[in-house]
């Protein structure tokens, strides 16, 4: 038979202290209550015995799991990796952990990853999903903050200033004399892409001699190439500027433009509404609107912790920045 799991009483006996002292030392609340030598003795006894605290009992005692659940629809881009890094850092500052959960069901109810999330985590942070998709996980009790979601989502939201990002991109191109635009728009039914499309269209609608064509595309390099081909094959003057919803779409646009013997930016300028590693891997490097995903994750966690504490979360939009590189330039004569 396996040896019985050591208890805090075993540690107390081995260290020659009370169980209360063991709890204080292993809970990092011993300073000012027991000596440093006693704390060292308790840790040594715990290590020798292989003692691990009973986390379930600790949770019941404290009334908190000190754990947050971050739900995302995909793990295929660095955006969500950076989002998690920022969320985990902000949570750790308040002695919370973050569990990352993938649920590609953006609108349909996501499966509860636990026997009962309501008894396992203290709150839910969800990115690019609907509140309805979280109904099974959070029930009617868990605090919820939505990222990259409509302010009408039915829960507190924290968003990147997507509309300003799209306006900055279009304004930059207008300043270079561009008037014939194509928006390579992600074919994902998501609030975030609706906002980008609306902002691009609204800004260009205010320019009398500007034209805009919208070509839906998959969020892939081949999708961007195919959408660019479709845009170039349409009748009428060739577009001089492509606004892409994602860096991967822009990389596909580069491939198709070069296949046709067109140069970036001499013949066609390209700008993207994300700024990840691929933006500096292409040649020329890509002008892009930078969304700071780590800051976004930090802000989301702070809003969720405020909600858990009964305070009003900070719902201000996270600012964005246009990073100008070599993919945009003045319209060529003729």
Image (cartoon, rainbow, N blue to C red):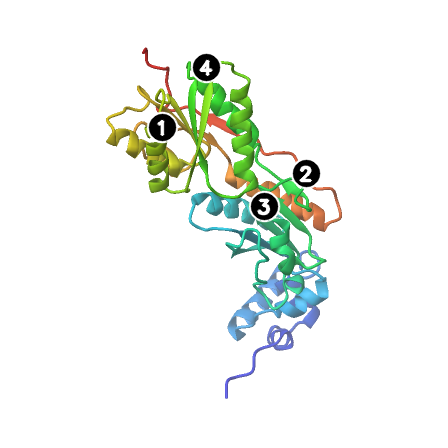
User: N-terminal of the two: label 1 or label 3?
Assistant: 3
- Residue contact between numbered discs 1 and 3, judged by CB atoms under 8 Å: no
Say whether residue 302 is visible: yes
Q: Nearer the viewer, mark 3 or mark 4?
A: 4
Mark 2 residue crowding within 10 angstroms, few (<14) / some (14–19) / many (20+): some
The residue indicated by pointer 4 is 175
Q: Nearer the viewer, mark 1 or mark 2?
A: 1
User: N-terminal of the two: label 2 or label 4?
Assistant: 4
Please tell me the numbered disc located at residue 280: none
The residue indicated by pointer 1 is 234
Residue 235 placement (x, y as % from top left):
35, 25
Q: Nearer the viewer, residue 288 or 193?
A: 193
Please tell me the numbered disc located at residue 314: 2
Q: Nearer the viewer, residue 26 or 242?
A: 242
User: N-terminal of the two: label 3 or label 4?
Assistant: 3
Please tell me the numbered disc located at residue 90: 3
Question: Does 198 sit above or below residue 9?
Answer: above
Say whether residue 285 is visible: no
- Residue contact between numbered discs 3 and 4, judged by CB atoms under 8 Å: no
């Amino acid at each position: 038979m396996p040896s019985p799991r050591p208890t805090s009483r075993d540690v107390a006996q081995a260290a020659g202290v009370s169980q209360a002292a063991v709890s204080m030392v292993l809970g990092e609340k011993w300073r000012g209550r027991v000596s440093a030598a006693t704390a060292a003795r308790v840790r040594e006894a715990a290590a020798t015995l292989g003692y691990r605290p009973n986390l379930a009992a600790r949770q019941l005692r404290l009334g908190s799991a000190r754990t947050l659940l971050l739900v995302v629809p995909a793990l295929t881009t660095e955006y969500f990796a950076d989002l998690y890094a920022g969320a985990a850092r902000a949570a750790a500052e308040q002695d919370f952990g973050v569990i990352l959960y993938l649920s590609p069901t953006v609108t349909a109810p996501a499966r509860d990853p636990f026997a009962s999330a309501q008894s396992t985590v203290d709150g839910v942070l969800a990115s690019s999903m609907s509140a309805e998709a979280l109904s099974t996980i959070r029930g009617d009790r868990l605090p919820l903050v939505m990222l990259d979601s409509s302010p009408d989502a039915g829960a507190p939201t924290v968003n990147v200033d997507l509309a300003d990002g799209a306006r900055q991109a279009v304004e930059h191109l207008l300043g270079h004399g561009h008037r014939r635009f194509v928006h390579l728009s992600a074919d994902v039914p998501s609030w975030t892409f609706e906002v980008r499309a609306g902002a691009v269209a609204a800004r260009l609608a205010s320019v009398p001699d500007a034209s805009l064509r919208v070509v839906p595309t998959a969020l892939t390099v081949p999708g961007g190439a195919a959408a660019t081909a479709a845009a170039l094959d349409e009748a009428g003057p060739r577009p001089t500027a492509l606004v892409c919803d994602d860096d991967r779409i822009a990389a596909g646009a580069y491939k198709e433009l070069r296949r046709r013997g067109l140069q970036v930016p001499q013949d066609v300028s390209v700008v993207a509404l994300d700024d990840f590693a691929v933006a500096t891997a292409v040649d020329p490097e890509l002008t892009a609107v930078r969304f700071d995903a780590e800051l976004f994750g930090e802000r989301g966690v702070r809003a969720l912790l405020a909600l858990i504490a009964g305070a009003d979360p900070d719902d201000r939009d996270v600012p964005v920045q246009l990073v100008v590189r070599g993919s945009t330039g003045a319209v060529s004569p003729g």
